[in-house]
Amino acid sequence: MSDIKYHEGMKNILEAASNLYQSNLDLKNFAKWPDDLVNSNLPPRMIPAAKLVENFPLSGTTETNPLIEAIKANVNLMHWKRTYTEEEVGHDLYNRYGYCELFGPEGHFKSTQLRGFIGYWGNGLDYDWHSHEAEEIYLNLGGNAIFRTKEEDILLNPNETKMHHSWQSHSMITHKEAILTFIIWRGKGMFGLPKMD
């Protein structure tokens, strides 16, 4: 893989994410797009869920489709991770979920202002109750899932958002469809990780 292909591929994902941000009032109201982004040359890293992302069969909306396509076209350049162990979440979820930190302290593009992730969960999964100190907003790119808090359950469709407050316990259930998301973290605890409740 050439450096040019890597840089162009990751730049395309970042540009599509920025364009989506600019088109979405909820994201713009949540946080200002970071202006300290520096390419970190983070090496690619594949996990089982990355292949599922590459073959993600669902389209989103006019606004979200460019980011979906940029991710699918460059999935093998992305540094995919899993927060939890197989013991914490079970074999099925462990092998059919994952995320990539697009920008942030450990991202493809370094930032200390904001953290942005691409997250994927396969169909028929129960992402159990968890929480984190950072405030968070999900934007659904494609597919759907039920987002649960103690206060409400909502079905999140493409180009819809759901915010979680600091340490607010939340969970997610996918049914017939997988879900691909763009997630932004802000504020205190931004450098931490989620914990199962």
Image (tube, rainbow, N blue to C red):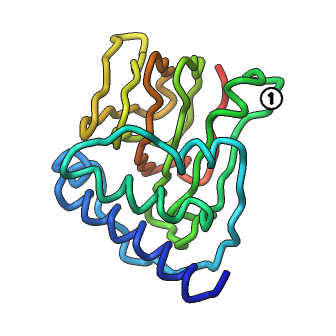
Quadrant of the rendered image containing residue 82: top right
Work out which quarter of the rendered image holds the N terminus and state it: bottom right
Quadrant of the rendered image containing residue 33: bottom left
Residue 172 versus residue 136 in the image, above or below: above
Q: Residue at x 27, y 50 (%)?
A: 64
Mark 1 is surrounded, within 10 Å at the Cα level, by few (under 14), some (14 to 19) or many (20 or more) other residues, namely: few
Residue position for label 1:
86
The answer to whether residue 170 is left or right of residue 41 is left
Q: Position of residue 18 (x, y in %)?
A: 30, 65
149 and 1: which is toward the camera? 1
Q: Residue at x 51, y 67 (%)?
A: 112
178 and 131: which is toward the camera? 178
Residue 95 versus residue 59 in the image, above or below: above
* Circle count: 1
Under circle 1, the secondary element is helix
The three-letter amino acid code for the residue at tag 1 is: Glu
157 and 107: which is toward the camera? 157
Q: Residue at x 43, y 39 (%)?
A: 57
Residue 147 at least partly seen: yes
Q: Position of residue 179 (x, y in %)?
A: 44, 33
Q: Position of residue 187 (x, y in %)?
A: 44, 51
Q: Residue furthest right?
A: 87
Q: Residue at x 58, y 54 (%)?
A: 100
Q: Position of residue 135 (x, y in %)?
A: 43, 41
Work out which quarter of the rendered image holds the C terminus and state it: top right
Residue 129 at least partly seen: no
